């Protein structure tokens, strides 16, 4: 089950029986399962002379298991960093198993489990590309978990939340990094998996689910960009409207992608509720800023359209509060952060603006007639935020030295080779 306290407490010895606060939804977190047979299998496939590769691969994989299940740190961010470093160290060794000429692609069994299910949901696949997919997926989920931690300052208040501009910039980088891992999985790893293995993948590792979480990360990155724009005197209303509309587009794409996934379970359903909540908020912001721009036009019809936007924003904000509550109460129970940044201003300003504009434009505004007005369309913008361009590390030198192969991680992805795998 995703989104439980064990997901958000990964990397720390401290186990709190509290309801986790969720600023960033993390669909699931998987860790490898310790295997005593992995080393034996690898020794049969990899000659011992190869710089003891079999021992290094199995030892490092088991080290990742220990770091995830028995962390040494009481600080969650430090614990996450330790696991990330171990995964990054494991990747160059793992890449050698994905090379067809080494004969290991379908010969080694890899087991993973969801951290929060205590082993109830395990998956076992004999394919090194599946192992690579699982590693990159875990790296992405850890990055999203780190982003969530950074948005919850130490000693946080239930009623007040201050996030510094530097922190927001750091979290934007984390969102782009997480999206980069997932984007790479979709375009460069999933196509390598045989159809029968793709069918066995958990719901949150299927292509549409990966694309949904990618767009979710980009949407939240755009939301933080809006928060930074609100603190900048140089940011115009047009910039704020554009960022709100871009966030809306990302969330719509994420919801559409996730809706295509079959048997998404409780985790997927809760993620859909998270996306609905954030979509409703983003739409309220978009109509608010669109209304402010229309209201500047010295024309009665534009001001009526502006008032329609303000009233729509007001109604959407009420709906977003209900959507937030629905999300929080869905199993597993979570809590949302207090309004801060862009949404805090939105909560404060919309009611104020609606009241003020109703008085100022009372001679052109009739509430009943406004209800019959067609709400103006929001403008469409090209999406500016893109995932990081992730590249695999170079192949571990032990593989190259032993076989005298000039192969790197980047060289693994030739188009002519792809056709032989899929």
Image: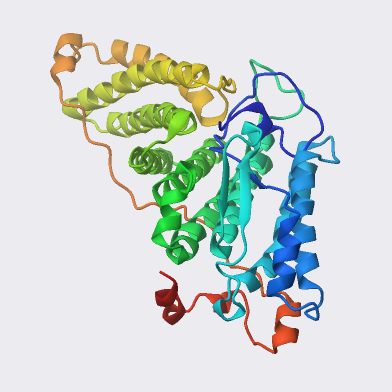
- Left/right of residue 226 with respect to residue 402 in the rendered view: left
Residue at horizontal 37 percent and vertical 41 percent from the top: 261
Residue at horizontal 46 percent and vertical 66 percent from the top: 192
- Percent from the top left, x then y, of residue 305? 22, 27
Please state which of residues 234 and 115 is positioned toward the viewer in this rendering: 115
- Percent from the top left, x then y, of residue 37? 72, 57
Residue at horizontal 57 percent and vertical 22 percent from the top: 336
Please state which of residues 364 and 108 is positioned toward the viewer in this rendering: 108
- Left/right of residue 305 with respect to residue 318 in the rendered view: left
From this view, report whether residue 11 is shown above or below residue 152.
Answer: below
Using the rendered view, name the quadrant where residue 97 is placed: bottom right
- The image shows a total of numbered marks equal to 0
Residue at horizontal 61 percent and vertical 74 percent from the top: 409
Please state which of residues 403 and 120 is positioned toward the viewer in this rendering: 120
Which image quarter is the C terminus in? bottom left
From this view, report whether residue 159 is shown above or below residue 175.
Answer: above
Colour pattern? rainbow
| Residue 168 shows in this picture | no
- Left/right of residue 148 with respect to residue 398 in the rendered view: left
Please state which of residues 271 and 226 is positioned toward the viewer in this rendering: 271
Which image quarter is the N terminus in? top right
- Percent from the top left, x then y, of residue 419? 39, 76
From this view, report whether residue 421 is shown above or below residue 134.
Answer: below
| Residue 154 shows in this picture | yes
From this view, report whether residue 354 is shown above or below residue 284.
Answer: above
- Percent from the top left, x then y, of residue 257? 36, 44
């Amino acid at each position: 089950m995703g989104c439980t306290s064990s997901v958000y407490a990964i990397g720390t010895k401290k186990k709190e029986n509290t309801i986790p606060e969720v600023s960033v939804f993390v669909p699931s977190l998987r860790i490898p399962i310790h295997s005593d047979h992995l080393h034996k299998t690898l020794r049969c496939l990899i000659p011992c002379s190869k710089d003891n590769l079999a021992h290094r691969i199995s030892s490092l994989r088991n080290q990742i298991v220990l770091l995830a299940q028995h962390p040494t740190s009481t600080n969650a961010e430090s614990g996450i960093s330790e696991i990330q470093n171990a995964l990054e160290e494991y990747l160059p060794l793992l890449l050698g198993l994905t090379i067809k000429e080494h004969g290991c692609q379908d010969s080694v069994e890899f087991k993973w489990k969801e951290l929060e299910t205590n082993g109830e949901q395990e998956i076992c696949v004999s394919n090194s590309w599946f192992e690579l997919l699982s590693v990159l997926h875990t790296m992405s989920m850890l990055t999203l978990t780190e982003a969530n931690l950074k948005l919850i300052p130490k000693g946080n208040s239930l009623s007040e939340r201050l996030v510094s501009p530097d922190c927001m910039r750091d979290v934007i980088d984390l969102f782009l990094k997480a999206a980069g891992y997932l984007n790479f999985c979709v375009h460069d790893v999933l196509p390598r998996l045989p159809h029968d293995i793709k069918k066995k993948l958990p719901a949150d590792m299927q292509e549409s689910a990966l694309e949904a979480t990618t767009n979710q990360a980009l949407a939240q990155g755009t939301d933080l960009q809006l928060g930074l724009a609100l603190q900048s005197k140089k940011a115009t209303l047009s910039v704020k409207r554009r960022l709100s509309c871009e966030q809306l587009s990302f969330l719509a794409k994420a919801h559409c992608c996730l809706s295509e996934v079959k048997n998404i379970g409780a985790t997927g359903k809760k993620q859909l509720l998270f996306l609905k909540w954030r979509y409703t908020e983003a739409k309220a912001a978009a109509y608010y800023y669109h209304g402010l721009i229309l209201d500047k036009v010295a024309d009665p019809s534009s001001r009526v359209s502006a008032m329609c936007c303000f009233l729509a924003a007001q109604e959407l904000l009420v709906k977003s509060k209900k959507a937030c509550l629905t999300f929080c109460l869905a199993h597993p129970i979570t809590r949302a952060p207090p309004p801060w940044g862009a949404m805090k201003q939105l909560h404060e300003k919309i009611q104020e603006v609606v009241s003020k504009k109703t008085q100022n434009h009372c001679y052109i505004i009739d509430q009943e007639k406004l209800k019959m007005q067609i709400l103006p369309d929001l403008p469409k913008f090209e999406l500016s935020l893109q995932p990081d361009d992730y590249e695999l590390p170079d192949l571990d030198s032990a593989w190259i030295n032993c076989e005298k192969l000039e192969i790197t991680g980047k060289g693994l992805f030739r188009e002519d080779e792809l056709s032989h795998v899929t």
